[in-house]
Image (cartoon, rainbow, N blue to C red):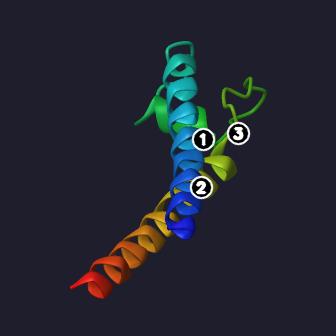
Amino acid sequence: MKRIVIGGFIMLGGLLVTLTIILSGAIYATQITASGESKLWHAIFGAKQYGDEVVQSLFLGLPFILGLIFSLLDLIILGIEYHKTFQNQG
């Protein structure tokens, strides 16, 4: 039970980081003047600069990827722990 609670809080932290970055990127994407495929993607990860253009990125790619990794790993851990719990009961 203790592992399930710990995994749940770590997964919640990863989801909070990931969703906060998506929200901040969505808010900032409305102010980007560069044209391209996805302004949200460019706001989070950055885009290629040409000449003396102003950098229009939040550079939050690494925290975004780490948040996704935490969420996915802890989701797998929670699934394994729940499977062990139900296997022991049945």
Of residue 11 and residue 33, the one placed in the foreground of this image is 11
Please name the amino acid that badge 1 sits on: Val
Please name the amino acid that badge 3 sits on: Phe
Q: Is residue 89 left or right of residue 4?
A: left
Which tag is nearer the camera, tag 2 or tag 3? 2
Label 2 to label 3: alpha-carbon separation: 23 Å
Which residue corresponds to mark 3? 59
Figure check: 13 above or below 88: above
Upstream in sequence: badge 1 or badge 3: 1
Farthest-out residue, left: 90
Question: Splitting the image into 4 quarters, where does residue 28 fall?
Answer: top right
Do residues under tags 1 and 3 come within 8 Å of each other at their CB atoms?
Answer: no
Figure check: 41 above or below 7: above
Q: Residue at x 78, y 27 (%)?
A: 52
Upstream in sequence: badge 2 or badge 1: 2
Which residue corresponds to mark 1? 17
> Helix, strand, or loop for circle 3?
loop
Which residue corresponds to mark 2? 10
Upstream in sequence: badge 2 or badge 3: 2
Residue 55 x, y percent position in the rendering = 73, 28
How many residues crowd around disc 1 within 10 Å: few (fewer than 14), some, or many (20 or more)?
Answer: many
Farthest-out residue, right: 52
Please name the amino acid that badge 2 sits on: Ile
Label 1 to label 3: alpha-carbon separation: 14 Å
Of residue 51 and residue 54, the one placed in the foreground of this image is 54
